[in-house]
């Protein structure tokens, strides 16, 4: 019985959507059936380039080669491929060396098109016909790869130059833009507004899954069905791409060479900026703060200190352990595994109360209280109002020119007075909307900030949303918490404190710019409000 291992490969997802795998499957199966070979295995490399040779080392074909070298594949086994392109489009010597190494171990390469059997005899030159067929096919594959590569390089450079000139080289553009080849890109306003809402949601603390739920509930997906399931819906990966896209900031990162790596050139002005720099920074900072706060019970936010607390003795993580009857404690994980001597532990409730009482008013900033669903509509109305002012100012400038020619015209003077009244009303509307936007983004007086933080602290036992807010906010303030078995030393850019096992606090200090790291303005505002109100020690006391 002759055994056969079929090998199929394609380079891109676009080929996966098409008939590449199905065609290869039909061809290799037909050859095995006609020769009476028993198919014992089918191997695929999806998204691996034969021209770069990725699959020969890191792909499934590379794994098969290691099994052959280890003697795990019987001599006489056929590796069946549709054509030699599936094995390699590298230079002739590289491809031949790989095939020679395999056939030297008794393995036979069977090619469907053109019909070709490559064994040790064929590769040695004894079977000159088979060898020449292999030579011609390999050279054809290499030449085709070189030709396609050169064409691709020229095409990419042409398209990049069009981008430098501010012109669209392809109608394939981000979904919030409209592209006509040879013309500047234009913004699809309703989609750009939705992108801004996604950034506002992220900045307010919503994770990717929560954002997707909101989008799928109220907004039609922009993309076609997924390439695996075909279902049309907002997906985490797509939302993540939007939140990381430089295109929303008006930047195109030029890529080139093998692997399409960044060249260092950034083209500005090709993509219209649709998200303010401040909102981009806040949204992406919030994503970093949420990193590591996942898990099966992430919605409960039962541990405020995920990823923050380490053991002084071994440097390992200190985690929250549930002992039963509602009691939880913090202890070194390595001590539980027997690799650390720091076996002491501290009540989680005691530590959480001290941290909340002393630091919550400093960790929670305005973004945690933003009315995210109100922000995008207000921002859209503000943009329209500013646009109206520009139009009115243009009318005003035109009428002034007319008045200079007709200084005594009552009609011109009346029209100019109406324009000035409209302009004053428009400016007043902009001021009102700017104030509404500030409120929607959560900005309040320092005293009001302290009141609403107290409200959050009072609801932690019963409100999971409040606990999630605390868990997500602390990493922005706390840089490290070190447990030495007797006390926790907590510190950050703007504070320092030690917390004993019984909850006693020692050495609590809020740094001041004149004798410590400079505080950012927002932090300084919250800190000074706490000091002025007598909540410097402790906030919840």
Image: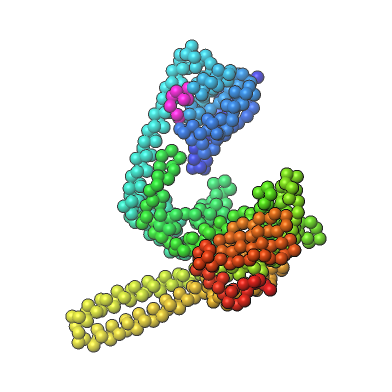
List the single residue furthest toward the left: 405
Q: Is residue 123 magenta?
A: no
Q: Residue 419 appears in which quarter of the rendering? A: bottom left
Look at 59% across and 27% down and name the residue there.
Answer: 66
Q: Estimate the x, y position of residue 226 in percent, counting from the top left.
A: 55, 49
Task: State left or right for residue 463 relative to residue 64.
Answer: right
Look at 54% across and 38% down and name the residue there.
Answer: 46
Q: Estimate the x, y position of residue 250 in percent, counting from the top left.
A: 40, 57
Q: Main secondary structure of the magenta part?
A: helix
Look at 54% across and 76% down and name the residue there.
Answer: 445
Look at 24% across and 84% down and name the residue there.
Answer: 412
Residue 73 can be seen in this image: no
- Viewer-closest of 40 and 406: 406
Q: Estimate the x, y position of residue 10 in percent, counting from the top left.
A: 51, 36
Residue 332 can be seen in this image: yes
**Is the N terminus in the top left, top right, bottom left or bottom right quadrant?**
top right
Examine the rendered structure and indicate whether residue 14 appears above or below residue 461.
above
Which stretch appears magenta? Answer: 89-96
Q: Estimate the x, y position of residue 230 in percent, counting from the top left.
A: 56, 49
List the single residue furthest toward the front: 515
Q: Is residue 93 magenta?
A: yes
């Amino acid at each position: 019985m002759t055994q056969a291992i079929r090998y199929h490969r394609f380079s891109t997802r676009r080929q996966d959507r098409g008939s590449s795998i199905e065609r290869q499957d039909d061809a290799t199966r037909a050859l095995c059936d006609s020769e009476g070979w028993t198919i014992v295995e089918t191997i695929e490399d999806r998204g691996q380039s034969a021209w770069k040779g990725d699959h020969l080392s890191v792909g499934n074909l590379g794994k098969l080669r290691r099994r052959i070298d280890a003697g795990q594949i019987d001599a006489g086994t056929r590796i069946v491929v549709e054509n030699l392109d599936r094995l390699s489009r590298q230079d002739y010597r590289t491809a031949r060396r790989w095939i020679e190494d395999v056939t030297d171990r008794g393995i036979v390469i069977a090619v469907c098109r053109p019909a070709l059997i490559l064994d040790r005899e064929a590769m040695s030159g004894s079977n000159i016909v088979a060898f020449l067929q292999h030579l011609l096919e390999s050279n054809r594959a290499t030449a085709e790869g070189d030709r396609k590569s050169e064409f691709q390089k020229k095409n990419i450079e042409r398209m990049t130059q069009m981008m430098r000139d501010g012109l669209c080289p392809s109608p394939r553009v981000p979904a919030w833009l409209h592209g006509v080849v040879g013309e500047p890109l234009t913004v699809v306003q309703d989609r750009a507004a939705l992108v801004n809402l996604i950034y506002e949601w992220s900045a307010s603390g919503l994770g990717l899954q929560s954002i997707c739920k909101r989008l799928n509930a109220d907004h039609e997906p922009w993309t076609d069905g997924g390439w695996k399931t075909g279902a049309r819906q907002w997906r985490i990966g797509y939302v993540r791409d939007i939140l990381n896209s430089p295109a929303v900031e008006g930047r195109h990162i030029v890529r080139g060479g093998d692997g399409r790596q960044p060249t260092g050139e950034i083209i500005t002005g090709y993509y219209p900026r649709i998200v303010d720099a401040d909102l981009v920074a806040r949204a992406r900072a919030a994503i970093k703060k949420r990193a590591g706060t996942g898990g099966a019970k992430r919605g409960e936010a039962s541990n405020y200190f995920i990823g923050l607390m380490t053991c002084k003795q071994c440097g390992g993580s200190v985690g929250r352990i549930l002992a039963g009857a509602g009691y939880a404690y913090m202890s070194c994980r390595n001590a539980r595994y027997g690799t650390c001597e720091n076996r002491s532990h501290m009540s989680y409730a005691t530590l959480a109360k001290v941290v909340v009482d002393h630091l919550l008013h400093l960790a929670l900033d305005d973004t945690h209280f933003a009315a995210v669903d109100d922000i995008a509509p207000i921002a859209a109305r503000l943009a329209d109002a500013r646009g109206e002012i520009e139009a009115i100012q243009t009318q005003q400038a035109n009428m002034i020119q007319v008045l200079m020619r007709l200084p005594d015209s009552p009609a011109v003077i009346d029209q100019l007075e109406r324009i000035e009244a409209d302009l004053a009303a428009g400016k007043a509307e902009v001021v009102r909307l700017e104030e509404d936007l500030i409120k929607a983004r959560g900005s309040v007086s320092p005293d009001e900030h302290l009141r609403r933080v107290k409200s959050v602290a009072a609801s932690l036992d019963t409100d999971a949303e409040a606990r999630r807010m605390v868990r997500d906010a602390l990493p922005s303030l706390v840089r490290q918490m070190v447990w030495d078995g007797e006390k926790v030393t907590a510190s950050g850019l703007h504070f320092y404190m030690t917390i004993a096992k019984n909850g006693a606090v020692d050495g609590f200090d809020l740094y001041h710019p004149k004798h410590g790291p400079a505080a950012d303005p927002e932090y300084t505002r919250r800190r000074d409000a706490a000091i002025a109100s007598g909540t410097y020690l402790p906030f919840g006391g």
